[in-house]
Image (cartoon, rainbow, N blue to C red):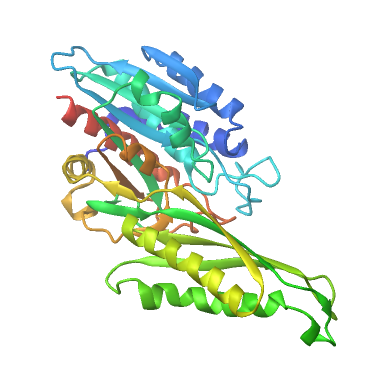
Amino acid sequence: MAVENWVARQLEELTEFRRDLHRNPEVLYDLERTAARVADALRAAGVDEVVTGIGRTGVVGVIRGRSDTRGRVIGLRADMDALSITEETGAPWASTKPGMMHACGHDGHTTMLLGAARHLAESRAFDGTVVVIFQPAEEGGAGAKAMIDDGLFERFPVQEIYGMHNWPGLPVGHFAIRSGPIMASLDEIRIRVDGIGGHAAFPHSTVDPVTVTAALVQAVQTIVSRNVDPLKSAVVSITTIHGGDAFNIIPSTVTLTGTVRTLEEGVRDLVEKRLRKAVAGIADAFEAKAELDYIRNYPVTVNNSEQVEKAVRAAVEVSGAANVITDVPPSMVGEDFAFMLGVVPGAFIFAGNGPSAGLHNPKYDFNDELIPYGCSYWTTLVRQLLA
């Protein structure tokens, strides 16, 4: 194991920093305290440039090595935002804000990259430049896209970019990665079914949107089973249905929401096309009206094979080849690092969080034992890429 000695010296301080973020979660773009703490820590570490307010509350630090003979620049990214969930861990460092918690480990991601940035700024033992990117609003706000639209890569042109996410169930000290799609696209669907309401005793004088909805929910489940190639992946889930207020009244309107996840843009296009046909056709069959609002949120997260090889090399040095999975199955969870990978070649890796509760669970907590491995992975990656 090549967890670096400097991490052990700073582990207590880094752990307390992580727990402070956990006690004080902030969501989406409202990260004033979190971003300020990150920026202050980068300045205290002697990072050459610290820029705030990119993509509203994003923070970027620039660390220059001892020399720059080849003009190489790499980007390392962490996310900072929490979730709108009420915590149930009972930990001494549990959230002090009702309805908000770090249920996805972004407090840990921020801490690990901050620890690595501190060491890189102190040692300068590399040839080139490292850009550390602390991003807001990964959880549904497309903060990566906001930073890109705000000129992130024009102001800080990087040649490669890397991201990391903790993964419950994967042992601490283990890493997992794959070339190609590693996380799914994340799309939102909203359907409104309009009929003609009336007394439930006279259904023949109504156009019942509840009946239309029942047929529609059944039909959309056949899109994957009967339209998508069985060797490819897609998920279509209807997750909410709202309509009616009384047991004896047929409502005029029913609304549905749901999500679509795919691992290929072609499959994504196919699912949207079939959804539109199903919504229109089934509503017409019942003489009702229906509208589909299909919202494309995050694209597929696609790892570049060359950068995956580099990420694997760093992970192996930190944890040993036996503890690095190089062909992990892709996850149908979405990740907005996909926007950055659409602009700059790079790789996204999973780091083991041990036997914790799952992500987005009120009992989840980031495992502080992961901090040394994450910090060491980042600094090893820099040392290898910018030798």
Which residue corresponds to the image point at 18% horizontal and 12% vertical from the top-left? 67
Q: Position of residue 250 (x, y in %)?
A: 79, 77
Q: Position of residue 155 (x, y in %)?
A: 36, 18
Query: With respect to residue 209, does 100 lie above or below?
Result: above
Query: With respect to residue 127, does 211 lie above or below?
Result: below
Of 123 and 193, the residue lying toward us? 193
Horizontal relation, residue 119 to residue 73: left or right: right
Q: Position of residue 349 (x, y in %)?
A: 30, 46
Let me know if residue 12 appears in the view.
no
Which residue corresponds to the image point at 30% horizontal and 72% vertical from the top-left? 229
Q: Position of residue 191 (x, y in %)?
A: 61, 63
Pick the quarter of the image with the N terminus. Answer: top left
Pick the quarter of the image with the C terminus. Answer: top left
Query: With respect to residue 276, does 339 lie above or below?
Result: above
Q: Quadrant of residue 316?
A: top left
Horizontal relation, residue 77 to residue 177: left or right: right
Of 191 and 157, the residue lying toward us? 191
Q: Quadrant of residue 343?
A: top left
Horizontal relation, residue 101 to residue 322: left or right: right
Query: With respect to residue 7, does 46 lie above or below?
Result: above
Which residue corresponds to the image point at 39% horizontal and 20% vertical from the top-left? 61
